[in-house]
Image: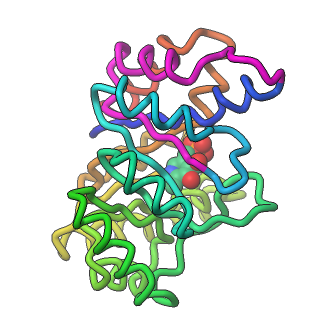
Amino acid sequence: MRLCINIDHIATLRNARGGTEPDPVAAAAICESAGADGIVVHLREDRRHIKDHDVRTLRSTVTTKLDLEMGASEEIVRIALDIVPDLVTLVPEKRQELTTEGGLDVLGQQDRLADVVHRFHARHIPVSLFIDPVQEQIEASHAVGAEMIEIHTGEYAEAKDGIEAQRHLDAIIHAAELGKQLGMTVNAGHGLNYTNVTRVAAIPQIDEMSIGHSIIARASFVGLDRAVREMLTLVRK
Ligand code: PXP
């Protein structure tokens, strides 16, 4: 199981004072030296945390894998085509949301997404689509040419009791199985933390996890190196 760390909230903290610290580029290096398999940043249209210059610098400093999470707007697509990250993860994006809410509706915008996927592939950039664990969305992701899906684990993470959590976990398992049957790489993420991650990490069809908030939150108490190592121990068990 690979673990990629989303460092958006290092930038959130930096931006709170408008200065340069803590520096997301330094954070990425600490995550990598602690054993992370990749670094994820979300360049949002409103640039509320990660800024363009962060992504450009990370492009030349990250030595594992740089995953650029992004909405499929024309402006951001052009920036990504110019920066050439190792992977792009397309997500839905609403300006008012606190964080990404729900998966991408691939089924409802197949032509547009097929075009965007094609443009990334022409630059040899692999594409992952962040989707809910729903059969039609997985099939549509495959149909538009994406080689990867990231299953949204937010509903599992936010389940109010064990029965509900199990229901969402079953959906994630079925989604991961279907993704694999279609020959896709299967990632998972959103809302995962030190207590709920192990049940998702135990799903054999999941190749990689993308985790941010819980690791950065823990890092504020124990340091980033230790927070990353603790999560790695859990996901690689
Ligand atoms: N994957 C995607 C597609 C996301 O949008 C996010 C949040 O930025 C994450 C993973 C990480 O979620 P969290 O910060 O809750 O770990």
Give the quadrant of the N terminus.
top left
Residue 110, position in %: x, y? 42, 88
Depicted 131 relative to depicted 6: above or below? below
Q: Is residue 29 visible?
A: yes
Residue 28, position in %: x, y? 46, 23
- Residue at 36%, 39% (x, y): give it: 66
Q: Is residue 41 magenta?
A: yes
Depicted 217 relative to depicted 92: above or below? above
Q: Is residue 52 left or right of residue 22?
A: left
Depicted 216 relative to depicted 198: above or below? above
Q: Is residue 191 visible?
A: no
- Residue at 18%, 74% (x, y): give it: 181
- Residue at 50%, 15% (x, y): give it: 26
- Residue at 80%, 24% (x, y): give it: 18
Where is residue 173, by image quadrant?
bottom left
Where is residue 96, by image quadrant?
bottom right
Give the quadrant of the C terminus.
top left
Count all numbered tags in the image, as a single digit.
0
In this rendered view, identify the residue nearer to me: 172 or 141. Answer: 141
Q: Is residue 171 magenta?
A: no
Magenta residues? 17-43
User: How was the colour assigned to the protein in this rendering?
Assistant: rainbow
Depicted 153 relative to depicted 64: above or below? below
In this rendered view, identify the residue nearer to me: 112 or 191. Answer: 112
Q: Is residue 164 left or right of residue 149?
A: right
Q: Is residue 234 left or right of residue 15?
A: left
Residue 141, position in %: x, y? 35, 78
Q: Is residue 215 left or right of residue 225?
A: right
